[in-house]
Amino acid sequence: MVNICVIGAGNGGQAFAAYFAMKGFDTSLFNRSSWRIAPIIENRRIKLEGEVKGVYDISFATTNLEEAMKGRKLLMVVVPAFAHRQIAEKMAPVVEDGQIILLNPGRTGGVLEFKNIFKSKGVKKDVIIAEAQTLIFASRMSNPGVVKIFRIKNAVPIAALPSKRNGELKEIMKEVMPEFELADNIIYTSFNNIGAVFHPATLLLNAARIELTAGKFEFYLEGISSSVAKVLEKVDEERCNVMKIFGAEPLTSVNWLKYAYDVTGKNLYEAIHNNSGYQGILAPPSIDNRYITEDVPMSLVPISSFGKEFGVQTPVIDSVINLANVMMEKDYFKEGRTVESLGLKGKKIEEILKLLEEGDE
């Protein structure tokens, strides 16, 4: 069986590690800080609650990345997208020939950023770098070593960079997690970024309630009213318009909910509220949360940047970014991923697509 290393021990990372252990895979778990995984380092166990129940033994947990990665075929990177650069820098000196790196998720342009870091660090190893469109679990960690999986999505698209290596990726993933489905290229994983639609605007439009209650309400089912859903629909429309630049057919948020959760509705508000997988998921306790710190600079900003580069207007997305800038006292337009920072400034659509499909070697 495939040996797996899970890099990152938050909500998703602990869910992945325990889930793979449940399926019988030899799984290591890495986290940068020890406090989050101290009990797991000691007893090597993670308790799953919710859709999957049980206590499962992983191989080991560690704060030593080289130890965690050594001899592992599949490296599942499960950290917020703003940490991709740092993790790539740490992985570069110790990555091995034949390893597969999968970002869970890449958000928008994650695999490009990761690839660029490896290139800048002179990595010559034959590795595949790929990304998932979203995290396959709707999960929350209650304590170190205890995580609840509210729902496992029916399917999540993944793609390698370059996509000519998708066949190798598929061969491994069909054994590990068949819910992952191959997309044509990373346009489908990066721009079908539903977190960019659901997270930042919802959080910002509920900022007062979050600050007054420390997030003691259901984020999706109470935080997304019919009026908030109308804003999300506009964000989604602009996202889809940017994706069409590449000649790709986008998956709307309503259609994604049907694809991932098998729920329907006549509009986005109805579809979200018909999703039992969102029941019990509380809002973040603060607006200083990855729904802003990850999803604005690593999702909305690159979508806006590609829109500007190729003449597609994104006024609502830009408004959400500006609100986040004011509330967080940041300039995410400067801090976030852009066409330029991803190494694509000045390239034509045809050149970008060729790079994504064939690589730059």
Image: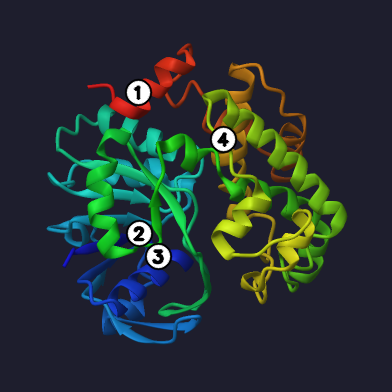
- Judged by depth in the image, the label closer to the viewer, 2 or 1, is 1
Residue 249's tag is 4
Tell me, for residue 355, which label it has, or none.
1
Q: Is 282 placed above or below 171 here?
A: below
Residue 298 lies left or right of residue 274; in this view the side is: left
The residue that disc 2 covers is 32
Q: Quadrant of residue 361?
A: top left
- Residue sitting farthest toward the right: 227
Instruction: Please tell me which of labels 4 and 1 falls first in the chain.
Output: 4
**Res. 201 visible in picture:** yes
- Within-10-Å neighbours for mark 2: few <14, some 14–19, many 20+: some
Amino acid of disc 4: Glu
Q: Amino acid at mark 3?
A: Gly
Residue in the picture at 65% in, 49% down: 253
Q: Secondary structure at mark 2?
A: loop
Mark 2 and mark 1: Cα distance apart in space: 32 Å
Pick whichever of labels 4 and 2 is earlier in the sequence. 2
Disc 2 vs disc 1: Cβ atoms closer than 8 Å?
no
- Residue found at x 29% / y 59%: 174
